[in-house]
Image (tube, rainbow, N blue to C red):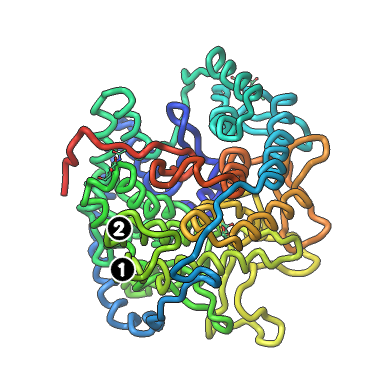
Amino acid sequence: MSSDPALRARKKGTETQPKAGAGKANASTSSIVKARDRPSSNGNGGWSSTSLLVCLAVIACTAGFVSWQTGYIDRLLTVKKKEWTPLPGYGEDAVVDFSADVPKRQAVVDAFKHAWLAYERDALGADEYHPISHKGTNLSEAGGIGYTIVDSIDTMQIMGLEEEYARARLWVEEKLDFERDGRFNTFELEFRYLSMLTDEEEYWRKAEQVMKMIKGAHLTTGLASIFMNPEDGRFVLSAIRLGSRGDSYYEYLLKQYIQTNMTEPVYQAMYDDAMNGVQAHLISKSYKAGLTYTSELIPERNSQGEISWRLAPKQDHLVCFFGGSLMLGAVTTGAVSFPVSVPPKPHELTEQGKRDWNVGRGRELVETCVKTHDTATGLSPEIVHFRISGDGLDGTLAPDDWYIKGARQGEAPPYDARYILRYASPPTLHLPNLSSFIAFRLTGDVRYRQQGWAIFQAIEKHCRVETGGYASVLNVDDVPVELEDKMETFLMSETLKYLYLLFDDASTLPLSEYVFNTEAHPFPIFHPTLRTGFS
Ligand SMILES: *[C@@H]1O[C@H](CO)[C@@H](O)[C@H](O)[C@H]1NC(C)=O
Ligand SMILES: *[C@@H]1O[C@H](CO)[C@@H](O)[C@H](O)[C@H]1NC(C)=O
Ligand SMILES: *[C@@H]1O[C@H](CO)[C@@H](O)[C@H](O)[C@H]1NC(C)=O
């Protein structure tokens, strides 16, 4: 499991499959489930010594944290408190306009149909679609589970595409078959809603048990490493980051709290704890322009075997979800009372709420993500690195603030340079993302629509395959672009859905009644009938 998780996990849609028709998985929680599912017959023999090692690692890691904290913390906490700054034109008496932008919304629907009809024509039933070769492939040799169909069907409903929806629904009714042997990742959140729908407590309890174990393994900072040992419930010494494998953990601390209508204080406590850790340890400012970004903490062992934590200035496109997530947290866990204004006024938020909303980079992170779209194509790369002092880059040739690591003129583009039709990361193209959608709904600031539209146009220009479908771009800094023959399922389930909602009337799926899971599927907020089993 530890072999290059970064590379494997980053492709949010590709290593994951739906469970019970709804979710996909990635990030930390899924790795827990996957590991737990390991058959005991082949796992038990090696575990005791492994557990011991892991225990030692955790102790060492904790010790490392303490020494790291004393050494570096002051330097990291360079971010100064800022005054509350209302958005331009959005003062105390702002009137925000949430009516639909019908032509742009229609353009997004047309794009969805361009993607869906090609898949339906060439590959209906297959998990994934390859728009250039006009072929479908499956994630498991045992056969497909209609991954693309299951993932896209709620977008059709939201967009009002009744004919497409009816055909997709018929496929689900007649052909969908989960009798496949294979490894499937799951998300505990969805489990809680499954319990609500089926009246079976078991799913709820299982999901809750995972959260309880994570809480019990608590690191002093409130943060979580991306791997845990399923046998002893402790963290394995591994990176701490908001990017791949870590992203959904932080997102779901908040969303679990919102999902049950803010009635389970334990999730609020875990979220607040984690956000304090993020603010103290992971938020950094770029060198020249002062862009706010999030770093990763990488454990390193010296020749004496001592562990220290290195702060790596590397941000996955995935992290772009986080700006919106912070803003959502600010108006929920950080609200003095409900509901707050749009945009919220300073006296409506607690100190932590204000920090996360304003000082706390909700908006600043989103702005940074927008800046990473500043490439030849207007698409954001999969991973960006930020300049830090002592990074050894040539001052005359190197960019001021951020760069794509390993990119050299005239050579094959590195993995980091691609744009894979993602929605989440703010930097480039993905944008019609959760962050822009949430930021628009919470502020009414039309700039988010403008940015979303710019990103949509970049997708149309560079990723559209004329014969049908959309393909990933191999290097966002190279025009004309070279395409990879793959259309990730999250184009239809996430990117185009968030774009549609961005241009739609705000009464569609209001944030006071729905919470979006990490794959953009809306779940109704409900009042829980079960009591939280831990605190
Ligand atoms: C993928 O799986 C589906 C459903 O089992 C099957 O109909 C289809 O032939 C498979 N496609 C390929 C390329 O194996
Ligand atoms: C998400 O949308 C926001 C708001 O438009 C934008 O600033 C940010 O760059 C986008 N992020 C991603 C992930 O594309
Ligand atoms: C959530 O809580 C609020 C305030 O207590 C209440 O008005 C609302 O009806 C609740 N929503 C649900 C779905 O239970």
**Label 2: few (<14), some (14–19) or many (≥20) C-alpha neighbours in 10 Å:** many
Number of numbered callouts drawn: 2
In the picture of the structure, the residue carrying the numbered disc 1 is 352
Is residue 232 visible in the rendered image? The answer is no
In the picture of the structure, the residue carrying the numbered disc 2 is 333
Q: In this view, does 45 lie to the left or right of 393?
A: left
Disc 1, SS: helix
Q: Are marks 2 and 1 in contact (CB under 8 Å)?
A: yes
**Mark 2 residue type:** Thr
Q: In this view, does 509 lie to the left or right of 384?
A: left
Q: In which quarter of the image is residue 134?
A: top right
Disc 2, SS: loop
**Residue, x 40% and y 63% (percent of image)?**
344
Which of the marked residues, 2 or 1, is nearer the chain's N terminus?
A: 2
Q: Is residue 502 left or right of residue 471?
A: left
**Vertical comparison of 204 with 421: above or below:** above
**Residue, x 31% and y 60% (percent of image)?**
335
**Residue, x 64% and y 67% (percent of image)?**
404
Considering every residue shown, the one lying at the far bottom of the view is 396
